[in-house]
């Protein structure tokens, strides 16, 4: 069976990482040929090290389009929603030949094009919903940011979610997201629960460098200024390094200006985008990771723990189910007070207690491998 694992753009991001690891793992099974399928080719390809190392083939679908039909721009107020998310579902089915027996779409914006292709080619489309459209609008864009537009958009996003589920052969998602979909009256008969994987380090480093890290794909919805407030109000002793892609790039400059204004240059440093190897080193060396954002899952949190890095995260994130009670002591309600309190707890641990915390974080991750994640998917598609 030839399987197309579909993303909208191959940039650095959570669901792109999941799609890439699925492609690698599914190719280990007999009679399964998986390809990474990308709707739109970007100027910079994310996870190039992993792609090269594993000889992953990428099928850029917009290579089939005439240049004039590749016109694109991002919509105001949104981090990633762009014109091609609307035009490609209309265009690609008429320019892309039937190369795949099954599609697995990652990301709700990706799903519209994938479903359209699958219908035209008379094959099945499975949608992996990391964050549904309405979930993103409801939880990651506050009322102040979108204002009255949010009230107009939200009913449309509910319709979009139901369209994706109704027109997908099957939906893969996390327990938290499935619970959310049930509340907005989506058909859950097609939904299958799944967890993400990680590459658990064989050996962890308990002799940490004195700094904390915050790692994600930074956009308006993530509100990175929240970290500055935590460090300022909490008078945190541990320096912070902020790592990851900023989209749009102007957010990075805005954040740097706030750091200077608050005179926190000695406490907070913006690192930005790093290579995969450097990121792993940050996980291994950092005293802890702080991730004060609600996530449907929270892949960054699991990956940090897999490298022996203690994690502070929001307790209603899906990754919570991967950890034992010891780690869950550092799951917060995401209030300023809770996040400061969790940091102080780690800063005040005795050495033996801290080493135990690192070990527990590492041990919690061991059963959540990419192999096990992809095995769930393989057991679904082998019956098709």
Image (cartoon, grey):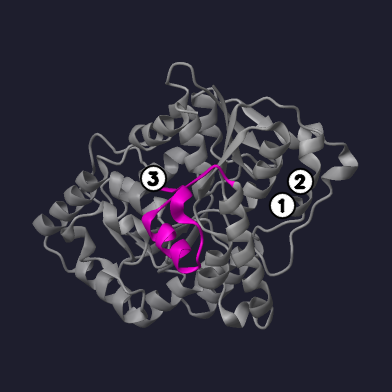
The answer to which quarter of the image holds residue 214 is: bottom left
Magenta range: 168-196
Q: Is residue 330 above or below residue 376?
A: below
**Residue highlighted by disc 2:** 88
**Closer to the N terminus: mark 3 or mark 1?**
1
Label 3 with label 2: CB-CB less than 8 Å: no
Label 1 with label 2: CB-CB less than 8 Å: yes
Dividing the image into 4 quarters, which one contains the N terminus?
top right
The crowding category of the residue bearing disc 2, from other C-alpha atoms within 10 Å (few below 14, some 14 to 19, many at least 20), is many
Comparing 211 with 289, the one in front is: 289
**Closer to the N terminus: mark 3 or mark 2?**
2
Q: Secondary structure at mark 3?
A: loop
Task: Identify the residue at horizontal 25%, vertical 40% (top origin).
Answer: 366
Task: Identify the residue at horizontal 42%, vertical 69% (top origin).
Answer: 266
**Residue highlighted by disc 1:** 85
Q: Is residue 326 above or below residue 10?
A: below
Q: Secondary structure at mark 1?
A: helix
Question: Could you tell me residue 341's position as x and y percent?
Answer: 26, 76
The crowding category of the residue bearing disc 3, from other C-alpha atoms within 10 Å (few below 14, some 14 to 19, many at least 20), is many
The answer to which quarter of the image holds residue 318 is: bottom left
The numbered disc on residue 196 is 3
Comparing 28 with 302, the one in front is: 28
- Specify the farthest residue to the top: 30
Question: Could you tell me residue 316's position as x and y percent?
Answer: 35, 66
| Residue 81 seen | yes
């Amino acid at each position: 069976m030839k399987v197309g694992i579909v993303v909208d753009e191959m940039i650095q991001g959570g669901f792109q990482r999941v799609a890439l690891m699925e492609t690698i793992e599914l190719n280990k099974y007999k009679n399964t040929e998986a390809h990474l399928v990308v709707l739109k080719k970007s100027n910079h390809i994310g996870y190039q090290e992993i792609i090269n190392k594993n000889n992953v083939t990428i099928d850029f679908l917009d290579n089939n389009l005439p240049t004039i039909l590749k016109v694109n721009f991002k919509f105001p107020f949104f981090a990633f929603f762009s014109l091609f998310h609307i035009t490609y579902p209309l265009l690609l089915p008429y320019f892309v030949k039937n190369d795949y027996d099954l599609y697995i779409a990652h990301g709700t914006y990706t799903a519209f094009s994938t479903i359209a292709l699958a219908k035209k080619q008379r094959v099945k489309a499975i949608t992996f919903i990391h964050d549904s459209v309405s979930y993103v609008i409801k939880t990651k864009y506050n009322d102040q940011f979108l204002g009255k537009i949010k009230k107009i958009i939200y009913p449309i996003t509910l319709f979009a979610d139901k369209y994706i589920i109704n027109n997908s052969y099957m939906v893969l998602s996390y327990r938290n997201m499935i619970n959310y979909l049930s509340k907005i009256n989506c058909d859950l008969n097609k939904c299958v629960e799944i967890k993400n994987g990680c590459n658990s380090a064989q050996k962890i480093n308990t002799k940490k460098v004195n700094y904390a890290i915050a790692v994600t794909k930074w956009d308006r919805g993530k509100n990175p200024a929240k970290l500055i407030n935590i460090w300022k109000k909490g008078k945190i002793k541990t320096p912070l390094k902020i790592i990851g892609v900023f989209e749009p790039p102007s957010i990075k400059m805005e954040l740097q200006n706030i750091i200077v204004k608050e005179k926190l240059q000695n406490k907070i440093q913006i690192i930005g985008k790093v290579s995969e190897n450097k990121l792993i080193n940050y996980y291994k060396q950092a005293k802890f990771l702080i991730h004060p954002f609600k996530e449907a899952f929270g892949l960054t949190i699991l990956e940090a723990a897999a490298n022996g890095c203690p994690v502070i995260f929001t307790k209603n994130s899906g990754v919570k189910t991967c950890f034992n009670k010891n780690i869950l002591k550092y799951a917060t309600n995401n209030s300023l007070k809770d996040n400061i309190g969790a940091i102080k707890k780690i800063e005040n641990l005795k050495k033996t207690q801290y080493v135990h915390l690192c070990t527990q974080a590492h041990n919690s991750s061991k059963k959540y491998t990419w192999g096990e994640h992809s095995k769930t998917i393989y057991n679904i598609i082998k019956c098709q």
